[in-house]
Image: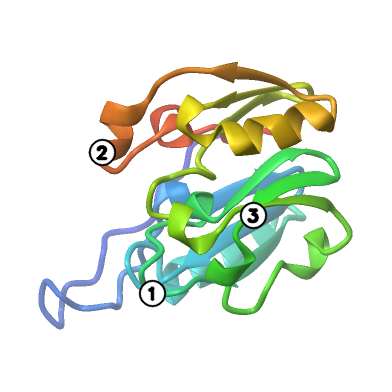
Amino acid sequence: MYVSLHMVDTSEGLNSELGPFLEGGDVLVLYKTVFVGNSGQASNDNGYRWLKTFLGHFGYNVVQVPLKNNVLHLDCALSLVRDGLMIVCEEALINGIPEELKNWDKISVPYSDVSRLAVNGLPVNDSVYILDPEFEYIGKQLISKGITVEYIDFEISRSLGGSFRCSTQPLLRY
């Protein structure tokens, strides 16, 4: 099944916040739980409420994750590597780590690396993660947790505001 947000409401002008707005970088899927980031830059509360209502009919739990206003997307602050392991910049999450993830092991990233897209790697499966070599300090921690890290230089793409997850937009997690 394919679905799309309805037409954005522009009745209050092109800069209206009515929306609803949802951007892929703000949406992280973990089985029947969907996390939606909201920093005021991309997805908004109306987008979150629309998705929560829509997916609620299919048994999904949709969780809003408020972000600091200079964090573009949720995938800049949170990466779900495998069940029980995440890469996270807690400082970027206004309310801290979502309750559904509080017991997970975490690899912490400093706030200064959020805008450099350090967290925006790509979990290929439960044991392989793609990462820019710029963030080898994250890779070393992943390796210590039994994850194989594949390094690909994505500096040019990162300089344009996108990295691995932005380039692939995974929607399913098995």
On the image, numbered disc 1 is attached to which residue? 69
| Amino acid of disc 1 | Asn
Q: Residues within 10 Å of mark 1 (few under 14, many from 20)?
A: few
The tag on residue 88 is 3
The mark that comes first in sequence, 3 or 2, is: 3
* Foreground label between 3 and 1: 3
- Along the viewing direction, whichever of 108 and 50 lies nearer the viewer: 108
Q: Is residue 63 above or below residue 82?
A: below
| Residue pictured at 24% horizontal, 71% vertical | 9
User: Does any portion of residue 54 appear in the rendered image?
Assistant: no
Q: CA distance from mark 3 to mark 2?
A: 21 Å
Residue 57 located left or right of residue 18: right
Nearer-N-terminus badge (1/2): 1
Quarter of the image with the C terminus in it:
top right
Write down the quadrant of residue 69 in the picture: bottom left
User: Viewed as shown, does residue 67 lie left or right of 157?
Assistant: right
Q: Nearer the viewer, residue 27 or 148?
A: 148
Residue at image coords 57%, 31%: 136
Helix, strand, or loop for circle 2? helix
Of tags 1 and 2, the one toward the viewer is 2
Q: Quarter of the image containing the N terminus?
A: top right
Spot occupied by residue 100 in the image (x, y as percentages of width and height): 81, 62
Q: Is residue 18 left or right of residue 55?
A: left
Q: Residues within 10 Å of mark 3 (few under 14, many from 20)?
A: many
> Up-down: is 139 above or below 97?
above
Q: Which residue is mark 2?
A: 159
The structure residue drawn at horizontal position 85% and vertical position 53%, both measured from the top left corner, is 104
The residue at the point 70 percent across, 31 percent down is: 140
Q: Position of residue 48 (x, y in %)?
A: 51, 67
Q: Earlier in the sequence, mark 3 or mark 1?
A: 1
Q: Are marks 1 and 2 in contact (CB under 8 Å)?
A: no
